[in-house]
Image (cartoon, helix red, strand yellow):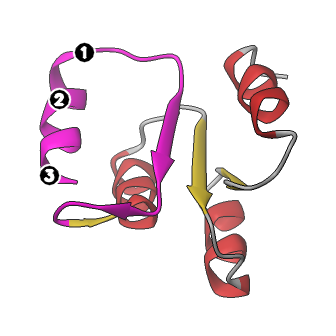
Amino acid sequence: MNEALKLLENISVDLICSDYNMPGGTGLELLEQLHRSGKKIPFILMSGTEDSFVIHSVKFYGGTFCNKTDSDLLTTIRKKANCE
């Protein structure tokens, strides 16, 4: 997670698609840090487990939750990438 934050200090991205489990933290923690820093980057958090706390938190911080086993995963990514 810290590596991702450092990388985002120097580059601009159109979309972040993150797994929940990351080395050094979680994708939710990454989304929270970006939200606190004021960065407005479309964010998709993926997980194989649908945890209601995680889903609610992702929405609270302005992201989109997507179950990795969801057959509409690519549709979700395309929609967020186009900022629909």
Q: Residue at x 74, y 55 (%)?
A: 69
**Where does residue 55 sit, x and y in percent of width and height?**
70, 72
Instruction: Look at the image and tell me in which quarter the C terminus lies.
Output: top right
Q: Quadrant of residue 49?
A: bottom right
Label 2 sits on residue:
7
- Cβ–Cβ below 8 Å for labels 2 and 1? yes
Residue extent of the magenta highlight: 1-24
Residue at the spot of label 3:
2
CA gap between label 1 and label 3 equals 15 Å
Query: Which quarter of the rendering shows the N terminus?
Result: bottom left
* Amino acid at dot 3: Asn
Residue 39 in the image: state x and y as whole percent.
42, 36
Amino acid at pointer 2: Leu
* Pick the front one: 44 or 84: 44
Between 37 and 33, the residue placed more toward the observer is: 33
Give the CA distance from mark 2 to mark 1: 6 Å
